[in-house]
Amino acid sequence: MTRSPGQLRTRKVGLIGGMSWPSTITYYREVNRRMAARLGGSHSAHLIVWSADYHFVEQAQLSGDWQEAARLVGEAAAALEAAGADFLAIACNTMHAVADEVARYSSLPLVSLIDATVDAVAGCAQVALLGTSTTAAMPAFADAFAGAGIGVVDLGEQAQRDLDRIIYSELCLGHVRPDSALRLREIGASAVERGAEAVILACTELNLLIGGVDGAAGVDGVEATSVPWLDTTVSHIDAIADAALPRNQEIQEIQASEEIQERRNRC
């Protein structure tokens, strides 16, 4: 028996955001866009956002206080579970360094950005990972790539210092600079010359420099198409939307019910 649309529910996303706020805006918008595209009509995501004060998150990262970082993420996870979320997602690459600690605070499943990224680069022999120094050295990323038989190209110390500066001192504060966009393009091109088949934007703000999920064209004067970019934000958002969607049969029931209701309204 076909149920009415009101009886069918998407799963509630519990998004741990604010790390930083510009990328959280992207997650919110793009998860909703994907849900609307799949379900049609006026449908959107059932999404609960915990937006952290990034100052405290950044201080924990920069000081290497991962116990405090885990506490911040864990308490957010617990709050989202109490608010009714069905699963969790951390809208930040670097904070996946403490993703395993979330289970101490919440029983909800976590949709992993790392798993989504590795799935997206399946078949590549070598990739480059562009993010904070913490992300670049993160065992979880290294183990996941190694398990998939994927090598990681060394970017060099200067490139990593530049990425840290661009991310922490500019993008996380909402500043998008043309010279930094050009530097990112140079780092990506160098990685390709070193053998990278995909250049992974492993920071949820880096897409602001080249355009991407936010729909922007990127910074004027920066040609990014010659570099095979792979944005972890896109892969993660796709995985979150997939986890939130009803089964295909339920989607068909939603659409059929709404078509019937629309015909009735015309009569």
Image (spheres, grey):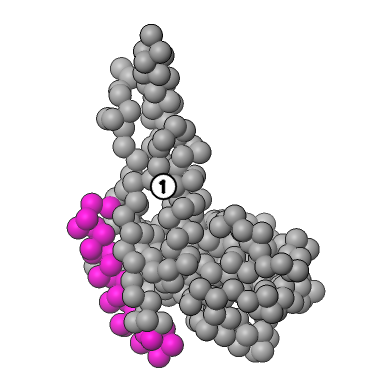
> What residue appears at the point 75 percent right and 69 percent down from the top-left corner?
221
Q: Look at label 1 and name its amino acid.
A: Ala
For the magenta stretch, what is the residue range? 59-85
218 or 134: nearer the viewer: 218
Can residue 139 be spotted in the picture?
no
In the image, residue 184 lies at what x, y percent?
68, 75
> What residue appears at the point 72 percent right and 62 percent down from the top-left corner?
228
Q: Quadrant of residue 28?
A: bottom left
Is 114 situated left or right of 212 in this image? left
Q: What main secondary structure does the magenta stretch of the protein show?
A: helix
Can residue 98 be spotted in the picture?
yes
Instruction: In the rendered view, tell whether residue 244 sits above or below residue 168.
Output: above
Pointer 1 local density, CA inside 10 Å: few below 14, some 14–19, many at least 20: some
In the image, residue 262 lies at what x, y percent?
40, 18
Is 65 situated left or right of 175 in this image? left
In the image, residue 248 lies at what x, y percent?
44, 32
Give the structural element (helix, strand or loop) at label 1.
helix
